[in-house]
Image: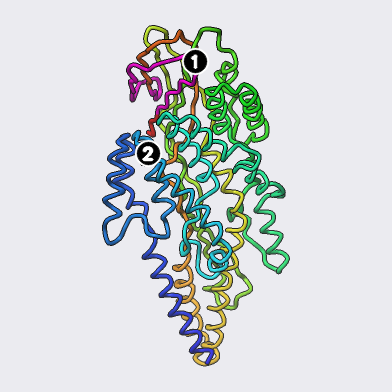
Amino acid sequence: MMKKQGNVYLALLACLGFLVLSCATKSTAYSNIDKAVNENEFEKGVEVIVKEQEGKKPIYPEKNAVLLFLDKGLLEHYAGNNSDSSQDLQEAERLIAEAYTKSITADVASYIANDNTKEYPGEDFEDIYINVFNALNYYRAGDLEGALVEIRRLTESSGKLSMLNQKYEGKGPDAGEHVLAQLRKIGLSVNQDLPQGKPVNFSNSALARYLSVLFYQGEGKTDAVRIELDQLRAAFASNPNIYSNPIPKSVAELQAIPKGKARLNVIGFTGLSPIKQEGVFTSGFPFFKYMALQKAEFKLPKFVKRPSVIDRVEVNVDGVGAFNLELLEDMGAVMEETYNARFGNLFFKTYLRVLLKYITAYITAVVIDEKKGALMANLSALAAKKTADATEGADIRMSRYLPDKAYVGGVNLDPGTYNIAVSFYSQGNVIARKDYQGVSVKANTLNLVETVNLK
């Protein structure tokens, strides 16, 4: 009976491995979208997504619906399709909220299979930046109140930033130490070279606070502007892992607009955020009798940077002069930091899941050893190990088209109409330029130009 159970286990494991591997979307599938994005042809990128979704094997399968609407919504935003972008980003946000209610059942299942088998629930940083870009959609559509509604979903006392602060509070000691402690309690040791996460230190977003300042300023709410500026400074003070750069000088200038002048604000997004890739790590299970099972494979996600070639962004206002944008938020650093909040749990699940697979393989090998001898038992253990390893796969799903950096700047001008040129530099050379003709700059209102280059 045990032999039959072992054979059934191996067969099921092989089938599961086939299903998991066949359902995974390979990174090469995104190559045509990536190419369009790298060339800043965002409309074309949207067209590729739509076309790829129509085939028998859509690039975003149903379980990755959050990413479909998030990636498409971001590209539509960059392309200037504000209404379509808002619709998609709101759907992504709805799906993330819906996935949260399913998380308990899905997490139990992921102890048996792996995280790739469940619906993608979105990351905390994706949930934050959905509102940031949707707020910009509303502003560009001429709906300042709508922009404020979106940004308040982050900044109010009951908003997402406050909830994240509560979620991350008490995460020390770091996630890795917590996992090691839990494993030691059940008598297991872990290879210290395995990635185990880092302390989480994120409770505020300077980018969200900056936009909040601008939108409140556009509505003439001076007290709210002051409060949000204090929160922006607090974000820099309390999140040193992310905000190692100084607060942009243009932030202080927001409260010092001379009488009769108008403020032109510019926000720029550059580069592409880091993405997850699968890392394969090993750790020993010396307590197993069969050599094949003494060295286990763990497949865990790791962040890989996609360095931008852009190192300076210059804004030239025709007839006035030029100024450089300053770094406000390293969005890639926010992503890596917030991901650490759940890495400990992910690591623990992966470790126990792999261990359980190896234990089952060991039991099967013991039965075979009693019936057919050590050679067949070792061969069985080796085959079971390969099958178990094949069914493992790091969950590397995340949005591919979030920017890496957010820059800001501004200048006080006489009210009027201006031609503006934004130049993107790499090692002293201009690699791209965007012109904004006939920009109306008015006093006592918000004048905001957004520029994007994801190279």
By what rule are the colours in the image chosen?
rainbow
- In the picture of the structure, the residue carrying the numbered disc 2 is 83
The residue at the point 37 percent across, 13 percent down is 418
> How many other residues sit within 10 Å of disc 1, few (<14), some (14-19) or many (≥20)?
many
| Residue mark closest to the camera, 1 vs 2 | 2
In the depicted view, which residue is nearer to us: 35 or 366?
35
**Residue 224 position in % (x across, y down):** 63, 26
At label 2, the amino acid type is: Ser
Image point 58% across, 45% down: which residue? 338
Which residue lies at the image location 66% right of the left edge and 46% below the top edge? 199
Q: CA distance from mark 1 to mark 2?
A: 27 Å
Q: Quadrant of residue 359?
A: bottom right
Q: Earlier in the sequence, mark 1 or mark 2?
A: 2
Amino acid at pointer 1: Arg
Residue 186 position in % (x across, y down): 71, 69
Residue under label 1, please give it.
Answer: 263
Residue 310 is inside the magenta segment: no
Horizontal placement of 427 versus 203: left or right?
left
Q: Magenta span has 438?
A: yes
Q: Secondary structure at mark 1?
A: strand
Residue 137: quarter of image: top left
Q: Which mark is residue 198?
A: none
Picture mark count = 2
Give neighbour class at mark 2: few <14, some 14-19, many 20+ (Cα, 10 Å): some
Q: Quadrant of residue 217?
A: top right
* Location of residue 436 with respect to 138 vertically, above or below: above
Q: Is residue 137 above or below residue 18?
A: above
Please report the bounds of the magenta region as a residue range: 424-451
Disc 2, SS: helix
Q: Which residue is more in the foreground, 190 or 244?
A: 244
